[in-house]
Amino acid sequence: MTRVHAYAAPSEAAPLEKTVIDRRELGPHDVLIDIAFAGICHSDIHTVRGDWGPQKYPLAPGHEIAGTVSAVGSDVTRHSVGDRVGVGCMVNSCGECRNCQRGDEQFCTNGTILTYGSVDRDGSVTQGGYSEQVVVTESFVVRIPEGIELDAAAPLLCAGITTYSPLRHWNVGPGSRVAVVGLGGLGHMAVQIAHALGAEVTVLSQTLTKRDDGLRLGADHYYATSDRETFRNLRSSFDVILNTVSAVVDLRSYLSLLDVGGSMVCVGAPAEPLPVQVMSLIGGRRSLAGSNIGGIQETQEMLDFGAEHGIAAEVEVIPASQINEAYERVLASDVRYRFVIDGSTFAD
Ligand code: NAP
Ligand code: ZN
C-alpha cells in the first residue's frame, strides 16, 4: 500500500477535509498515475451530499483525472512511464458481458466499478481523483493527446464524454438543430462538440449573462429560459435537446421545443424525479431519453476528436484548500466553466 494525501468528505453533511488514503500495490496490469489535475464535477457534489443515495464515508470524490504515468506493472503494454493519461468515471468492469463486449463498460451487467464510492475487486471502497496519485488497471486509462493541456483535458474525462456520447448516439451532424440546456461544465463541452460536429447550436440558459461566452464557444443562438417568450418563439424547432441541468426542469416546456420525431436527452441528474406529461411526447412522436457517460474506447475517440478540433474545457485552477468554496460556487451556477484542482496542492 502507498499512502497519499487526498481530500475527502467525512459525511454527507460535512465539508471535505484533508486526509490520507491508501493506494494498492501495483498489480501486473496496473498503472500508477501522478495526478496533475482533477476536475470538480457536479456529480461529485450530488454524491458526497447523498443526493443519489447513501455513501460509504469518508469518501474522496473526483472522476476527471489527468496526469502522468509514474510506474507500470510487469505486464502493462498500453502505457509507459511519462505518458500523459486520463481516468474518468470508471476504473473497472467485467469485460465479458454483452455491454462490455460492445464497449459500453458504463452499463456492465455485472456492475461497473466507479472511480469512487464503488466496492472494488479486493473489497475496498474506491477513492477518486481528489488525491496525489491513483492506481488503475491499464484498460481503463486513456491517452491524452499532445494538443491538449492537462488542466484543460481533465474535464473531458467526464463532462466531455458525457456530452460527446449522446451527441454521437443521436446522430448529431450537419443539419441537426441542437439545443443545450444549461451552460455549466457539461453544457460548455456540449456546445463545442455539437458545433464541431456541424450542428446548428442553441444555448438555453437561465439568463443571458454568459451569452458572449456561449457564442464564442460555438453557439449560433442563445436564449434565456427565464423569459417565457423563449418557449413561445422556439416551439417545435429542435431535433435534439441535451439537458445538462443539475436541478429539476419543467419537461413539458422543453418537450414543446422539439420538432416532430425529436429527442430530449437528459444527462443532468437531479435528486428529485422529473414528472412528464405523456401527451407532450405523443403530440409530436417525441422521445425522452437519458445517457450515462460513455465507454472507454469512445472516451479515447472523444479526446482525439477534441485535439483535432481544438476542443478543451475552460478551467479555473484552484488549490485543494478551496474545494469547499468551489462547491458552493458550482451550486450557485457561478463557474466558468469547470473548477480543476491542482494535484500538487493536496499535501499543503
Ligand atoms: P454545472 O457545472 O453545475 O452545470 C449545470 C448548469 O445547469 C448550470 O451551470 C446552470 O446553467 C444550470 N442550472 C443549475 N441549476 C439550475 C436550475 N435550478 N434551473 C435551471 N438551470 C439550472 O454541473 P455539471 O457538472 O455540468 O453537471 C450537470 C449535471 O449533469 C449534474 O446533475 C451532474 O450530476 C450530471 N452529470 C451526469 C452525467 C451522466 O453521465 N449522465 C455525467 C456527469 C454529470 P445556466 O447558468 O446556463 O442556466
Ligand atoms: Zn462527472
Image (spheres, rainbow, N blue to C red):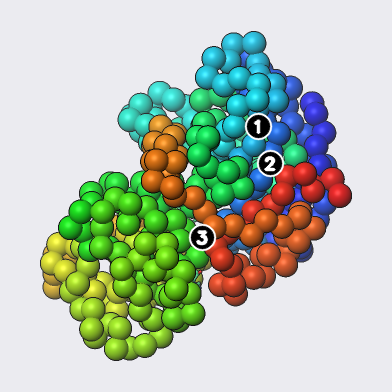
Name the residue type under label 1.
Thr
Does any portion of residue 124 appear in the rendered image? no
Q: Residue at x 23, y 51 (%)?
A: 173
Residue 94 rendering spot, x and y as whole percentages:
47, 27
Task: Identify the amino acid type marked 3.
Answer: Gly
Using the rendered image of the protein, determine whether residue 84 is visible from the camera's viewpoint.
yes
Q: Is residue 103 left or right of residue 127?
A: left
Report the residue that reaches farthest toward the right: 348
Quarter of the image for residue 323 reads bottom right
Residue at 28% in and 82% down: 231
Question: Tag 1's secondary structure?
Answer: strand
* Sequence-earlier tag: 2 or 3: 2
Q: Are marks 2 and 1 in contact (CB under 8 Å)?
A: yes
Residue 110 rendering spot, x and y as whole percentages: 45, 32
Residue 286 appears in which quarter of the rendering?
A: bottom left
Rounded to the nearest whole Å, what is the CA distance between mark 2 and mark 1? 7 Å
Question: What residue would you read off at disc 3?
Answer: 185
Q: Mark 3 or mark 1, which has the lower sequence index?
A: 1
- Name the residue beneath numbered marker 1: 68
- Which of marks 1 and 2 precedes in the sequence? 2
Q: Is residue 175 above or below residue 259?
A: above
Rendered view: 100 above or below 224: above
- The CA span between labels 2 and 3 is 19 Å
Residue behind mark 2: 36
- Label 3 C-beta lies within 8 Å of the nearest ligand 1 atom: yes
* Pointer 3 local density, CA inside 10 Å: few below 14, some 14–19, many at least 20: many
- CB of mark 2 near ligand 2 (< 8 Å): no
Against 282, is 310 above or below?
A: above
**Secondary structure beneath label 2:** strand
Circles 2, 3 touching at the beta carbon (< 8 Å): no
Q: Amino acid at mark 2?
A: Ala
Dot 2 alpha-carbon crowd within 10 angstroms: few under 14, some 14 to 19, many 20 or more:
many
